[in-house]
Structures are given as C-alpha cells and as structure tokens.
Image (cartoon, helix red, strand yellow):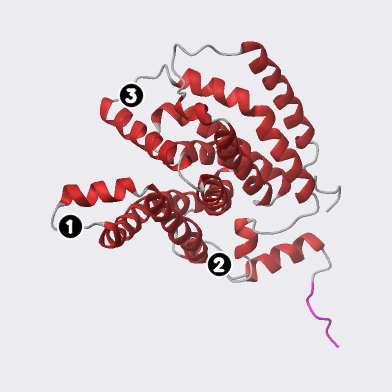
C-alpha cells in the first residue's frame, strides 16, 4: 500500500495550510492593505461630512422657526449646541464605527475580521489598559508643551477662524446645563470607541500589514492628528495618536487605546466642569510653560513607555 504524501515538516505544513486559506477581496484584486487604509480615510472623511450635512438638515427642520431664512436656520442650530454634538455623534457612529465594520470585509475574510481590527481581549489587556490611562495622565504636560510648540506654526486666517469657531462651540457646550454627562458621552465615550475602531483598528492594521508596525504606529498617529483639521493642534493630536497606536501594538487589542482616549477626552471634560475658567484659556507663543513639570513629565512618560514595551509578548524560541 502506498503511503499518503503528507509532509511531517511543521513549517511546510504551515506554508501548505496558508496557501489554502481564502484571500480577502483586496488581495484578490491587487489592492495593497496600505492603499485600502488610505482610501478608507478619504472616503470616511467625505462620508462623515455628508452624514453630518444630512443630519444637520434634519435637525434644522426640527429647531428652525423659519425654514425660508437661511440666516435664521444657521442661528437656530448654533444656539442649540447639543444638536451639533448629536450630529457629530451620528457621523462618528455611522461612518467611523459601523462603516469601518463594513469596510473591513474587503480586507479580511470571515472569521478573521475581529482579529484584523484587534477587537478582542488578550492576556495582558487589562494591565496595559491601566498603564495606558496612567500614561495619558503623565504625558499631559508634554502634550501641552507640544501644543505650545505648535502655536508657533503659521496658519491661514480662514483655518484659524474655523478652529476658533470649533473651540467656541465646545466651550459653549461645556458651559451648558448637563454638560458633564453629555460631554462625557459626546466628547468622551463616542470618539473613544468610534475613532479607535477606525484608526487603531482598521487604518493601523492596514498600514502594518503592508509597511510594518513602526511605520503603522507613526503614520496612523499622524493621520489621526491631521484628520481633526486643527493645524495648530496637529502635534499634540498626532502624539496622542502615536501613543494610542503603541499601546494597541503592545496589547494586540484596541481596548487600552479606547480607555486611554477616554481618559484624555473625558478627563478634560471633568476638569472643565470643576475649573470652567480653563475653557477660556488658549495656548499661544506668549503662554508661560511650566518647563520643570514638562521635563518631569517627559522623564516619567519615557520610563513608563519603556516598562510597557517589556510587556510585549515575544514569540517563543523554536515556534
């Protein structure tokens, strides 16, 4: 009787097995993963604004007294800041979260999509989560310092006006009734979940599969910073994006980044509720920086990053 031609070499078996696995849509059609990631960033940006425009139009119908007067419509919406944040939340949930959960079907086959997005619990996830929250707290003075450096970068007047308008809306919202609870929801929870699914989930993984983890961490962080359309805040936002990407890589899960993101956003909402005067403060080149505190922050942040780095599980020898 002839023996079956079955390899006993584990490496050959793994290679043979991988060749039999179905390929995702993008690989079957010649689209590199990094291209898919960039395309989704552009499509999501457009989709977010389209959904926002539609939701804003519906909101205008409900709050405007005179639908024939465009000025009155804009005035009615601007006076109801909570509606603007609701519109923003609708855009984030429908595009960044649900849209990403749909688009991942093009980049991963069924059964591998949660793994692709790192929507999972891992062995060290809760310890990394706790350390990630601490990391955000320790890095806060450094982030403020980056914002101060960023304030020296010249920006077009129209962009500064748009950014100031956004800041004014947030300030007005956080000074309104029930600001703490609504702020924690719209500014804390929603971005922490939706933006992490998109950026640390899909975009980072897409870049990583094509260009490697270091490229993915830094480029996804920079894209995250640029996506907010705040040129005078791009350095601190990109730095936070890189930190979120790093703890995602260490834990192999987006859960630590979600909690760290919430700690940053929610922490600022809580602080502004107790110290409303901070809402009127802006960082400019003339702002005095607490350089000793910043130096301590840099040292402690670097030390914690080094400690977290040691938690990355290495592959065992011979496997």
300 horizontally vs 207: left or right = right
Q: What crowding class fits label 3: few (fewer than 14 Cα within 10 Å), some (14-19), or many (20 or more)? A: few
310 in relation to 254, above or below: above
Distance, label 2 to label 1, CA atoms, is 55 Å
Residue 312: image location, x then y, percent: 77, 42
Residue at mark 2: 23
> What numbered label is drawn on residue 155?
3
Nearer to us in this view, 246 or 149: 149
Residue 76: image location, x then y, percent: 27, 50
Residue at mark 1: 66
Q: Is residue 101 visible?
A: yes
Nearer-N-terminus badge (2/1): 2
Q: Closer to the observer: label 3 or label 2?
A: 3
Nearer-N-terminus badge (3/2): 2
Residue range of the region highlighted in magenta in the rendering:
1-6
Residue 130: image location, x then y, percent: 75, 43
Residue 75: image location, x then y, percent: 25, 46
- For label 2, the SS is loop
């Amino acid at each position: 009787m002839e023996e079956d031609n079955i390899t006993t070499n584990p490496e050959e078996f793994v290679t043979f097995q991988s060749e039999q696995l179905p390929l995702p849509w993008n690989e079957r059609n010649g689209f590199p993963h990094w291209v898919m990631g960039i395309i989704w960033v552009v499509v999501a940006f457009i989709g977010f604004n389209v959904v926002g425009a539609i939701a804003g139009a519906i909101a205008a119908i409900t709050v405007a007294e005179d639908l024939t007067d465009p000025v009155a419509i804009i005035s009615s919406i601007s006076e109801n800041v909570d509606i603007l944040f609701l519109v923003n939340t609708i855009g984030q949930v429908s595009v960044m979260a649900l849209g990403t959960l749909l688009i991942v079907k093009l980049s991963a086959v069924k059964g591998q999509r949660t793994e692709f997005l790192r929507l999972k619990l891992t062995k060290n996830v809760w310890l990394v989560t706790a350390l990630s929250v601490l990391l955000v707290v320790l890095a806060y003075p450094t982030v403020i310092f980056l914002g101060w450096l960023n304030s020296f970068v010249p920006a077009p007047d129209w962009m500064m006006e748009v950014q100031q308008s956004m800041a004014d809306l947030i300030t007005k919202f956080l000074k309104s009734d029930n600001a703490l609870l609504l702020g924690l929801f719209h500014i804390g929870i929603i971005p922490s979940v939706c933006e992490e699914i998109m950026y640390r989930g899909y975009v980072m993984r897409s870049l990583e599969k094509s260009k490697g983890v270091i490229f993915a961490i830094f480029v996804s962080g920079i894209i995250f910073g640029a996506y907010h359309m705040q040129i005078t805040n791009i350095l601190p936002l990109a730095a936070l994006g890189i930190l979120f990407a790093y703890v995602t890589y260490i834990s192999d899960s987006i859960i630590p980044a979600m909690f760290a993101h919430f700690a940053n956003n929610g922490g600022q909402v809580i602080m502004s509720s107790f110290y409303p005067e901070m809402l009127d403060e802006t960082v400019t080149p003339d702002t005095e920086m607490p350089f000793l505190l910043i130096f301590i922050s840099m040292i402690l942040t670097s030390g914690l990053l080094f400690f977290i780095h040691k938690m990355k599980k290495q592959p065992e020898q011979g496997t």
